[in-house]
Every structure is written in structure tokens, then in C-alpha cells.
């Protein structure tokens, strides 16, 4: 029977405890280390007892087996103690950690939804502004094209009026004799020289 102390047996506690060094007594009996050898033992040679080889092999095997068994028991008890300690520590901690992770996940999901909504509003406002800007540019381009068309029509009207005005001085078969008489009555001298500023500096006299 093992005595149980604090959930552990005394035997398990002894097995799990670190192995201490072998204690050697400083004094054996009443004789100290500095005393001389007794007269009855002077010249005595200690001869070790004979050792049986077969018995030595058996003892060595049994000692090796004993060490393996004790090491296995020690490891098993240690593993059991550590497992119980881990279960005691991580039981409530795991539950608390799971609760904290669930709360953190909910908070992160709520923040993610808010961030998505904020980005969606920004994106919608940007798209609306881009559409309004595109519509404004389209209207401005249409107005500009209309203005250019009106200017083109006005320019053509001015060219037509100018041509109509110049057509009044055209020489035709009807006014050919009249224009010849006018040219003879009003001769023009085109034999002249001009300077760089376009002023007439020299002109010959008509004969």
C-alpha cells in the first residue's frame, strides 16, 4: 500500500525526486582515520572473496533489468504527474482562451463589416463623382462642338457675303466695254519701287 499525500503516492514522490549522492560516514565506529593499524592486523593482506562468473553474469543482467524497470516506472509516474498538472492548468485556461478568441473574432468581424461599409460608401461616392465629371465633360464637349459649328457657319456666311461683294466688281460680258473704257480713262502706274516698310520710294511717269 502506498500512502497518498496531495494526490501523489509517497512511492511516486520518491521516484520522481532527484537521486541524491551516496553519503559516506566520516568516522566508522570508535576508531578515527588517523589511528595506526592494530597490532593483530599488521602484515595482513586482504584477499577479496572469490567471484563466481556465472553468478556475476546473472547479477549483472538482473541489475540491468532492475535499472530499466525503475527508469520506466519513474518516467511513467513523471508523465502522469505532468499530464495531470497540464490538465489542471489548461482546463480553465483553455476555456478562457476560447472565450477570449471568440470575443476577439466577433470584434474583428464587426470591425471588418464596418470597414467594408465605409470603403463601399467611399467607392460609391467616387464612382458618382466620376460619373458626374464624365457627364460634365460630355456636356462641355457637346457645347464646344456646337460653338465651333456655329463659328464655322458664321465664317462661311462671311466668306459668302465677301464673295458676293467682290462679285459686284467681276468683269462679265455685260460690263466688259464699260470696264475697258474706265481702265482707259483712269490709267494706273504699277511701275514703282517700295522700301522695307512698304512705302513707295520711286515711281516712273506714265507716257
Image: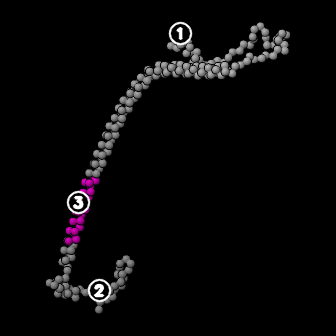
Horizontal side of residue 169 vs 78, given as left or right: left
Give the residue drawn at x 75%, y 17%. 48
CB atoms of marks 1 and 3 within 8 Å: no
Which quadrant, please, contains the C terminus? bottom left
- Measuring from the top left, give residue 140's x and y in whole percent: 26, 55
Of the pair 132 and 67, the residue shown nearer to us: 67
Q: Which residue bears the numbered disc 3?
A: 146
> Magenta stretch containing residue 144, yes or no?
yes
> Is 97 placed above or below 202 here?
above
- 2 vs 3, front mark: 3
Of the pair 206 and 176, the residue shown nearer to us: 176
Q: What distance separates the C-alpha of mark 2 from that of mark 3?
A: 49 Å
Horizontal side of residue 1 vs 204, given as left or right: right
| Bounds of the magenta segment | 136-160
Snapshot quadrant of residue 180: bottom left
- Measuring from the top left, give residue 87's x and y in whole percent: 46, 21
- The reply to whether residue 67 is visible in this rendering is no
Q: Which residue bears the numbered disc 2?
A: 189
Horizontal side of residue 99 vs 154, given as left or right: right
Query: Residue 40 shows which numbered tag?
Result: none
Give the residue drawn at x 64%, y 20%. 58
Q: Which residue bears the numbered disc 1?
A: 1
Snapshot quadrant of residue 172: bottom left
Amino acid at each position: 500500500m502506498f500512502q497518498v499525500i496531495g494526490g501523489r503516492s509517497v512511492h511516486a514522490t520518491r521516484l520522481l525526486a532527484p537521486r541524491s549522492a551516496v553519503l559516506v560516514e566520516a568516522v566508522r565506529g570508535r576508531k578515527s582515520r588517523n589511528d595506526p593499524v592494530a597490532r593483530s592486523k599488521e602484515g595482513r593482506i586482504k584477499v577479496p572473496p572469490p567471484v563466481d562468473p556465472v553468478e556475476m553474469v546473472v547479477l549483472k543482467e538482473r541489475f540491468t533489468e532492475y535499472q530499466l524497470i525503475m527508469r520506466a516506472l519513474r518516467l511513467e509516474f513523471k508523465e502522469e504527474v505532468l499530464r495531470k498538472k497540464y490538465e489542471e492548468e489548461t482546463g480553465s485556461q483553455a476555456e478562457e482562451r476560447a472565450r477570449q478568441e471568440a470575443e476577439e473574432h466577433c470584434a474583428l468581424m464587426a470591425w471588418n463589416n464596418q470597414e467594408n461599409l465605409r470603403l463601399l460608401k467611399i467607392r460609391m461616392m467616387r464612382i458618382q463623382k466620376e460619373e458626374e465629371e464624365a457627364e460634365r465633360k460630355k456636356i462641355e464637349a457637346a457645347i464646344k462642338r456646337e460653338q465651333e459649328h456655329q463659328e464655322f457657319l458664321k465664317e462661311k456666311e462671311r466668306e459668302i457675303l465677301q464673295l458676293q461683294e467682290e462679285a459686284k466688281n467681276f468683269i462679265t460680258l455685260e460690263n466688259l466695254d464699260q470696264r475697258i473704257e474706265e481702265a482707259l480713262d483712269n490709267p494706273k502706274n504699277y511701275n514703282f519701287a517700295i522700301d522695307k516698310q512698304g512705302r513707295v520710294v520711286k515711281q516712273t511717269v506714265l507716257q
